[in-house]
Structures are given as structure tokens and as C-alpha cells.
Amino acid sequence: MEMKEMRGVYCDTLLTLAEDDERIMVLEADLMKASGTMPFKQRFPERAVDVGVAEANLVGVAAGLSAAGKIPFAATFGCFASRRVFDQFFISANYAKLNVKLVGTDPGISAAFNGGTHMPFEDIGLMRMIPDLTILEPSDPVSLKALVKQCAEHYGCTYMRLHRKAVQPLYAEDAAFTLGKGKVLKDGTDVTIIALGAILVPEAIKASAMLKEQGINAAVIDMHTVKPLDEDLVLTYAKKTGAIVTAENHQIAGGLGAAVANLLSTRLPTPMAMVGIHDEFGQVGTQDWLQAYYKLTAEEIVRKALSIRRKS
């Protein structure tokens, strides 16, 4: 299957939803071209709002529109969607129990040349502290399309990390997804790799193939929804394989790995390792260079899996 630009799929999905539901609106903070939502503005100019370089106001306007019965999808770079607007999103949207769909683009190293100031390694950690918030990161165009639709159907605030660039589809077009439920990409018996996002899920698949060459049968789970975590699936595979490796384009503190560790430590203590950012800031570089520098690679997943996997 051909590669598809994720931001294009995001906009196309919103256009499809908006054709049938006049409540769907798009909000931007002077990044409509970057987010890929210009076609939405051209098709529905009265339902597209650009507040300018004013991210806190972006969330405030989205909250007001939600209170008026609209379903606002508000997007900006992930660093702004988390750090800069945290209080507004916490109070005006979540505490008020409204229906704001906040989208943070360019998560983690995908910010690339925008550098350390624009490289959100901590956004999931911040958002996980907000009660009742749904947090997700689709891994490919197919999962993105399905999960955006489910976000629109779900009443309540959501935070979605959106990889903007083109990626290879991992799933068939008819693949089914459920918000809050992980997707098993490959079954296994010796170790489970639980991965997140468009960078690390493909690396997890590669790692599984590399482990197979060494006679190790690794399961791979695309945990596209970080909160609520699919606890039943994690516990099932922890019991089945006896070892868990998490992989994410985010700080291991507060992210997917922390969520899985919190669960396992209280319900089913299991050998575990984490691949992710280890208490570091971002920096300028190509995505490939950054991926190698921070060891967000299949090779690192394999190394961690070999250190903890169950030996038969």
C-alpha cells in the first residue's frame, strides 16, 4: 500500500464527518497549512476558525463552541497543545466536562528541525493527569481515520498526538479499531512489545521479526489509546509471555511505559523494560538522526527484550 500523509488523512476524515454532522468544526492557531486543514476551510469556511498565534485562546474558543453544542477539533503543535494551554484545557474544557477534541501535531522527534523547544516528549505525561481525558496516538492512516471518527462520536475531551508526515499503512482498509482497546498486530509467547505511534509501532514490528530470527516469539501490540489503558489486554499478555517491553516516542516518565508499569506493579508484577526518552530535552536534527540518537529503534527494542524475556 502507498504511503499517505497523516495530516491529509486527518483533514479528509473531518471533511467526511462534517458533510453529515454540522456540529463538526476545525480550529487552528495560525497553523492551518501545517495541520493540513486548509481544504476544510475552503469547503466549510463558516466552520473553520483561525484564532491566530494565541493557543490558550484556541482552547477557550473551542470550549465555548462545545458549550454551544459544537464538536470542535482544535489543533496546534504538540508542545503548544500541552505545555502552553494546559490550564485552559484542564479547567475550561475538562473540568467543565465539555467535548473539546485537542490535537497535538509533530509529537516527539517528528518535530525534527523545529528543535528542542518544539519537541514534545512530555505531553502524554501532562495529559495523563487530567481526570477522564482520553489520550490516543494513531500509528498509521487507517487507524487515524477510524479513531478520529470515534473521537467525534465519543462525548468528552480527547487529546490526540498527530504525526503529520507520510507513513506506510500498517493495516488493511477494513481493519476495526476501538477507542480504549489495544490492537494485537502479532501474537507471541516469549515477550510482548507494547508500542505507540507512527514511529515506534513499525519499529516494534521490525523488532519482532529480528527476534524471530533468534528463535524468540514476540507479540506486538499497538496501544493506540494510552488513557484509558486497555488493562485487560496488558494483563493477558503479561501472563501469557511473562515479559513486557514498551516503546514510545515520549519520555518514559509519565508516558505509555509508566502507565503499563503502574498497572503491572499493582496487579501482576512482570519483568519489564522501556524504550523511550530518558530524561532528556529535544534537539534539532533529521527524524532518522534523532531516532538513532535517542535509541527509538528496533535494535533497542530487541536489546531490551533479550534482557528480560522468558527463557524456555
Image (spheres, grey):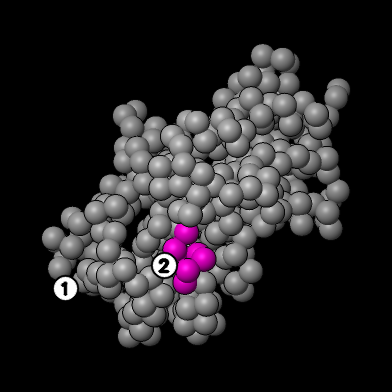
Magenta segment, prevailing SS (helix, strand or loop) = helix
Look at 51% across and 44% down and name the residue there.
283
Kindly identify the amino acid type of the residue bearing the numbered disc 1: Glu
- For label 2, the crowd category at 10 Å Cα-Cα, with few meaning under 14, some 14 to 19 and many 20 or more, is many
Q: Picture quarter containing residue 222?
A: top right
Kindly identify the amino acid type of the residue bearing the numbered disc 2: Lys
Q: Residue 177: give x, y in percent of width and height.
A: 48, 49
Q: Residue 217: give x, y in percent of width and height.
A: 70, 24
Q: Residue 181: give x, y in percent of width and height.
A: 58, 53
Look at 20% across and 57% down and name the residue there.
38
Location of mark 2 (residue): 101
Using the image, determine if residue 273 lies above or below residue 87. above
Using the image, tell me which numbered label, if any, was put on residue 109. Answer: none
Q: In which quarter of the image is the N terminus?
A: top left
Magenta region:
79-85
Q: Earlier in the sequence, mark 2 or mark 1?
A: 1
Using the image, determine if residue 67 lies above or below residue 112. below
Location of mark 1 (residue): 46
Q: Magenta segment: does it hold 114? A: no
Left or right: where 206 falls relative to 7: right
Q: Is residue 147 visible to the viewer in this orientation of the structure?
A: no
